[in-house]
Amino acid sequence: MRVIVIGSGIGGASCAYHLVRRGVETIVVDAGDAGAATPAGAGIVSPWTSRHVGAGFDLAARAGAYYRTLVPALAEDGEADVSFEIVGGLVASDDDTYLSAVSDRLSQRARQWPELGEVRRLDAAQARELFPPLADGLGAVHVSGAGRVDGRVLRAALLRAAQRRGLRRSSGRARLVVEGGTVRGVVVDGERIDADAVVVSAGAWTPDVLAPLDAGVEIAPQRGQISHFTLPGTDTTAWPVVLPPTGHYLLAFPGSRVVAGATRETGAGFDHRVTVEGQREVLDHALRVAPGLGTATLAETRVGFRPATPDGAPVVGSLDGHPEVVLATGFGAGGLTVAPLAGRLAAQAVVGEEPEVPLDEVSPQRFTPR
């Protein structure tokens, strides 16, 4: 069996990795478009702290737990450093009533999802011990199981591990080849590559790839601007993720680096620019929560296009009317959490296995008129 995976972000890279582990001949094709979500993503892995429980939440919760399986598997394949670390998380606020409600909600979830870890209330002084730049007066609910990951590092590890097992890679824009109502492969820069199945993990560019099929899958680019700061001489390695009620966030990485984000700009199209308004939004929210970052160096601002769906849920599974086409896309702001498991589930669907997680809520068939 030969499978072509269109897109080599986290979703595509994970799918390719899980396919070659099953002995499937796999080819990844990537267009290299500016603004791909994976290299721009912040890297928070804490789905259990989400305030929103709707379509796709169960998949996200399972995906957060799946990191505990994926990381050892990659280590067995020679990739010991994939950047994933459990550093804990702070749901921060100056509203005691809000924090009490959060503590109750997360304590209940921890019974279902033990990966969330221990849940405990912290006063402002205790919160600042863990994340020193925090504003005075911000208490927090601390969860010990929240994690972080560098999307660039994880993607590279997945692709290297897959290549050692025979993965082939191709650069260029893939166009589906449809014959007799069936997708037979792709054309890349004039070269036809036949395949038994095609996985589309093209992020915000998914509708362009699916255009020959008139599939009706609703995915649009949502621009996100995310800023990186450096704090020379400060060890940020163990700092937790910070999650204020606004939906903006802070997290730290080794190398005295702190990441702040992010804008959620619907309707910006594929405009790959750092804008003055977007930069101000990120900085205003970051400094409101953590004024101690005011003396940090603004190292860079990354721009990425989240593949957003109308209902906020990802798109994973076989395309209605085209069982030879499987989607793993539409991850929105949760790509670095959801995509590793979604890639595995897509690989299972491609080879005819029953996916280990029900896909009813995230199936592309929900876009098909009934």
Image (spheres, rainbow, N blue to C red):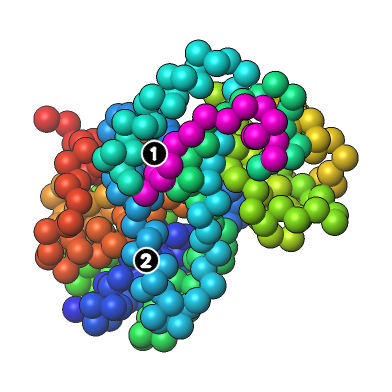
Q: Position of residue 62 (x, y in %)?
A: 30, 49
Which of the labelled discs sits on residue 48, or is there none?
A: 1
- Which quarter shows the C terminus? top left
The answer to whether residue 107 is seen in the rendering is: yes
Q: Residue at point 39% right, 54% down?
A: 339
User: Which of these two is toward me, 329 or 146?
Assistant: 146
Magenta run includes residue 127: yes
Residue kind at label 2, given as amino acid type: Leu
**Element on which disc 2 rests:** helix
Label whose residue precedes the other's in the sequence (2 or 1): 1
Which of the labelled discs sits on residue 228, or is there none?
A: none
In the rendered view, tell whether residue 200 sits above or below residue 272: below
Q: In whole angstroms, how far apart are the C-alphas of marks 2 and 1?
A: 18 Å
Residue designated by label 2? 70
In the rendered view, tell whether residue 299 sits above or below residue 324: above
* Residue extent of the magenta highlight: 115-129
Quarter assignment of residue 308 = top left
User: Which of these two is toward me, 330 or 370?
Assistant: 330
Quarter assignment of residue 111 = top left
Residue kind at label 1, given as amino acid type: Trp
User: Which of these two is toward me, 51 or 10?
Assistant: 51
Q: Is residue 169 left or right of residue 277?
A: left
Q: Is residue 171 left or right of residue 346?
A: right
Q: Residue at point 80% right, 53% down?
A: 234
Q: Position of residue 331 (x, y in %)?
A: 40, 45
The answer to whether residue 207 is seen in the rendering is: no
Magenta run includes residue 28: no
Q: Position of residue 15 (x, y in %)?
A: 33, 65
Could you classify mark 1 by the number of other residues whose Cα lies within 10 Å: few (under 14), some (14-19), or many (20 or more)?
many
